Amino acid sequence: MGDPKAFLNIHRKEAGYRDLHDRVKDFSEVEQTLNTHDRKLQASRCMDCGVPFCHWACPLGNKAPEWNDALYKGDWQLAYKLLNATNDFPEFTGRICPALCEKACVLNLTDHEPTTNRENECAITEGAWRENMIVPQQYERNGKTVAVIGAGPAGLVAANRLNKMGYTVTVFDKNEAAGGLLRYGIPNFKLNKAIIDRRMAVLEAEGINFVFGTEIDLNALAADGKLPQGAFDAYVVSTGTPTARDLNIPGRELKGVHLALELLAQQNRVLAGMEFSKEERVTAKGKDVLVIGGGDTGSDCIGTSHRQGCKSVTQIEIMPKPVEGPEDPNSPWPNWPRTLKTTSSHEEGCTRRWNINSLEFLGKDGKLTGVKVQPIDWEPNPEGGRPKMVVAGEPEVIKCEICFLAMGFLKPEQPQFADNVFVCGDAASGASLVVRAMAGGRDAAKKVDAYLNK
């Protein structure tokens, strides 16, 4: 810890967002950056705690005190080396991670001004790219082959780690490019896809083979599958959670009701140069928008709708409104507080409502015109378990011409795989954070290595 009194003298300072009226006109990243001097000062606030709860809270076990100290002292190369030792792609998490480490920071307990770990992480990595510290390396091959199925964050980490161990790695993905939800779920205003392409160029130069537009039948990898198990020495299944949770209420077939990824994935493809017909295009331009689901995916739909030129946005959530304020009595520090989250997309304009149940999609001539909803409440279940939903108000209609369902994803059911098949990321755990998927990919690489060397 370079400055033991910095946390007393220097307040937390975030880079903040671009001007609201400016950023809604494009899909460029909304988050700004601090200058080098201010970034070092923010790093100096880390207290190098005897028990680093930030390290405990991070699924990757990032050693924030170590690389914050190196950043404060101006040793950017050491800072990146320490960061990259636990985090294969910190340019991703430095942009989109909810920063569990910051909520577990001791400074968050004492004054609700935790160290800006996520922004520091991004700054360190961008400095590494800027100074050409990240260049392709070549690794001695061990003669064994591994197939990674799915090029999302979990699959990319597994492939990267296995490649460094000397395995010949081939990554298969059904899409036309790598990234999974990083590319096809997260909007460009949160993660510019050039950031993914930049890393992909390094991975390919280091010898990882990528095969796109190819969907692998996972049943063929089952213990009784027909695919010759000798095709690859081992397989890593990292296909994520491809099935979104739907809302099968009357009127679901109306034109204008879409799953969230139908909007998000298509918009990202449009920005990448792909063209769609007028009938295929999913757009909120000139429309009243309703988003059903209060999580990050719903927030991404809000921001995308604004940039497409929507008339208005309403977001509804069936669960109660989270507590406001920095502390959550039901999940105290250092655990993650389930408090009200206001994103940059919410700031751009949105009516938010909680405890709202959707009853029916309404339409005219086959097109959506509104959604009938009803206020509800939750009561303890006398038999235990999930609380009981009870009616708390009269039905009403929310006017909308387009509705996005952002209610999460279903955990995939996997077959009983052969011994040389390893599942990781969301494909194993169900939908979760990118940082957890990356940790799962790292663990899968260790298991593959142990299996092939037992």
Image (spheres, rainbow, N blue to C red):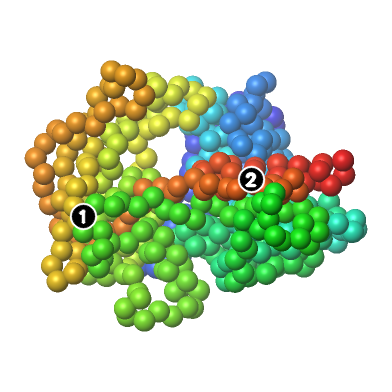
**Residue 65 visible in the snapshot:** yes
Q: Which mark is residue 416?
A: 2
Q: Secondary structure at mark 1?
A: loop
Q: Quadrant of residue 174 in the image?
A: bottom right
Horizontal relation, residue 39 to residue 292: left or right: right
Crowd tier of the residue under label 2, counting other residues whose Cα lies within 10 Å: few below 14, some 14–19, many 20 or above = few
User: Which of 42 and 371 lies nearest the eye of the viewer?
Assistant: 371
Q: Residue furthest top?
A: 382
- Residue annotated with mark 1: 250
- The amino acid sitting under disc 1 is Pro
Which of these two is toward me, 430 or 36? 430
Compute the Cα span from label 2 to label 1. Answer: 36 Å
Residue 368: image location, x then y, percent: 19, 64
Which residue sits at x=28%, y=43%?
317
User: Around disc 1, counting alpha carbons within 10 Å, would you say few (fewer than 14), some (14 to 19), or many (20 or more)?
Assistant: few
Task: Note whether residue 34 is visible.
Answer: no
**Amino acid carrying mark 2 in the image:** Gln
Identify which residue is drawn at 32% across, 47% down. 293
Looking at the image, residue 353 sits to the left or right of residue 448; the answer is left
Q: Tag 2, which secondary structure? A: loop
Total marks placed? 2
